[in-house]
Amino acid sequence: MPVTLTGTADELKGFGALKILAVGTQSSTEISKKTGSAAEVSPLANGLALTLADGSTSFGGSSSAIMKIVASLAPASGLLGGSDLESAQVDSWVAYGTTNFEVPVSALKAAAAAASASAGKVNEGMVKSIKDDMAYSLSVLNCHVTPDDANYMVGKSVTIADIALACALREAVAEKLWDPSASEEKTVSLSKWYTSILSSDFFVAAIASLASEGSAAVAVAAPTVAVADADSSAGVTLSGIAPPVRNNLYKRNRIRIKEVLKSKILIGQSITVAGWTRTLRKAGGKLLFIEINDGSCGTSLQCICEATATEGFEDAKKSGGTGSSFQFTGVLSESTSDGQAVELKVTTSKLLGAVYGGDAKFETVGGMLYPMSKKGHTLEHMRENAHLRPRAGLHAAAMRVRHAMAYATHRFFHDHGFLYIHTPIITCADCEGAGEQFGVTTMLGADHTKPGVELAVHKEPEPVEEKKLSKKELKRMAKRAAKGKQEESVKPEEVHVPGSVDYSSDFFAKRGNLTVSGQLNVETHACALSDVYTFGPTFRAENSHTARHLSEFWMIEPEIAFADLEDDINLAEDYLKYCVQYALEMCAEDLEFFENNPYGEEGLRDRLRNVLDSPFQRL
């Protein structure tokens, strides 16, 4: 169910609604518009009111206040800032936009309406005063976004500060108080920032929702996308703007721990979480401290079960400890302990899976023989217990980063107008050599334990009697030889080495191998579809057992038509830097974990920032 924004028809098309809708599109929060009295929804409403998906919780106040509430529903979006300092800066810029842009523009509108009603003129002195004040405020913003790396008001990603200020400036532009297209030195950086925000996918979608009629969930149509200039910070979306993902049918019956740890709005509310036990500590037999993790982030959530207040306490107590699976329902509260911001006071505990490691037959509940303890393990130990390896912090962090890099890869090429081509994994072509390392055959049979398997081999060719040519054929050959022509077969001749395996009875009637590259196949598509890429598993084997040599890995291979080597180099550098930037912004917690892990790399994030900030050397 979407959240509902209630207001008059005019309010739902105003800049206040635009702010809220823009936050919704950026955070993937579905917002339904409903025409009606906001005061009936919330006594604190100031033109607009918000009702949460439960239908009973409502909020009023200014559009900025409602905007913050919508942002808090998706804490992972980072719209409120990534730290306490950034949150304070965001609040400061939102207030700055209200005081220096929204209030003056509203006053000017009111004065114009009053003058129109009385057939009079707007006070020229007031208009000049507003323009002078606004010019100074614009210069302040321009100074803030002047540095080359200042693409956003706060931090390295969009926040509600960017959205609030962009909406306020959009109103100022409509009232002809500022012209972002004018090449004024005082606002050149601000104009670039303003254009970047307004041309972003989420803002374009929000403007489309603003113009939609009706009280149903707004369907955002993808507008026509213009090709962005190569130097523009607005980004490119050559394949169009995708529709927002909506919870039409699917809905989690729990809240991910990642959202629980970042959302202060959940404190004091009853929530449901689920996950696997990292640690279980008993205190006097009447109290359990259970840390669970659901894989959404590296940090666990402490859940407190009390014998007198928690339903299912005894089952939790006898779960086997580390590795057991639970679903907890309880009230989230601020934690008084160091190292954790919140904790869950469990009211209902549901044991989903106990740990059967109490004996050698694994028939008794207990953790004595469970392979994964709360302490760290070596990589060798995790490989020996590969089915439990994803529960280890190192492997889980690697999978989250790998997912982010795969998504960033598809996002980069999709927005550049490339087509994703699925190339064969089993192939009879040898693209880059070494393709014979991993052969694929059906000739060994389905029963791998069957002894004495014999493979068909090529036999010695039988001698063939030389056929006598007729006089007519001899004369024809002589004429062709005189003209310098020779009869050549277009079809390549298959050479069979006596004693080698005969694959004619195999599945493909010839030898098949696991591919070493999809490049050969994707090049043929580039000659018809222009810009394409393949991203899939490839297989190579070298006589080296190091971290630098893998028998199986996924490889990205783009092919661009009508381009030269310089274009190819530029594409490669842009792609790598985009992935690095995506990792730094979206996987910050996991990268920090890698820096502090014995198997990680000290100074990893600094090295990645250096890659991002430095131009690549070209030889």
Image (tube, grey):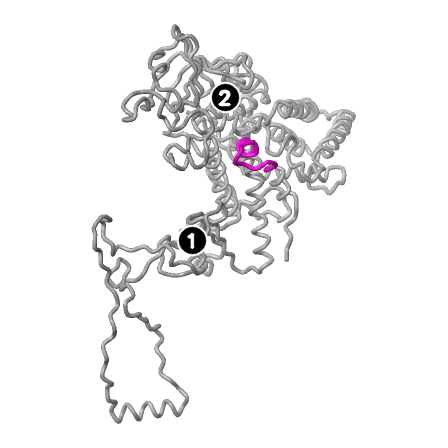
Q: Quadrant of the N terminus?
A: top left
Q: Which residue occupies the foreground of this view, 109 or 152?
A: 152
Q: Which residues are the magenta region? A: 589-604
Q: What is the tally of numbered marks visible in this picture?
A: 2
Q: Quadrant of residue 525?
A: bottom left
Residue 600 is covered by the magenta coloring: yes
On screen, residue 269 versus residue 564, left or right, reads: left
Residue furthest front in the image = 360
Q: Is residue 468 above or below residue 255?
A: below
Q: Tell me the amino acid under the disc marked 1.
A: Arg
- In the picture of the structure, the residue carrying the numbered disc 2 is 6
| Residue displayed at 50% across by 15% down | 267
| Residue displayed at 36% across by 34% down | 387
- In the picture of the structure, the residue carrying the numbered disc 1 is 540
Residue 56, horizontal then vertical, whole percent: 44, 15
Q: Quadrant of residue 563?
A: bottom right
Q: Is residue 259 above or below residue 560?
A: above
Q: Which residue occupies the foreground of this view, 359 or 123?
A: 359
Residue 292 is covered by the magenta coloring: no
Q: Is residue 536 above or below residue 337?
A: below
Q: Tell me the amino acid under the disc marked 2.
A: Thr
Q: CA distance from mark 1 to mark 2?
A: 60 Å
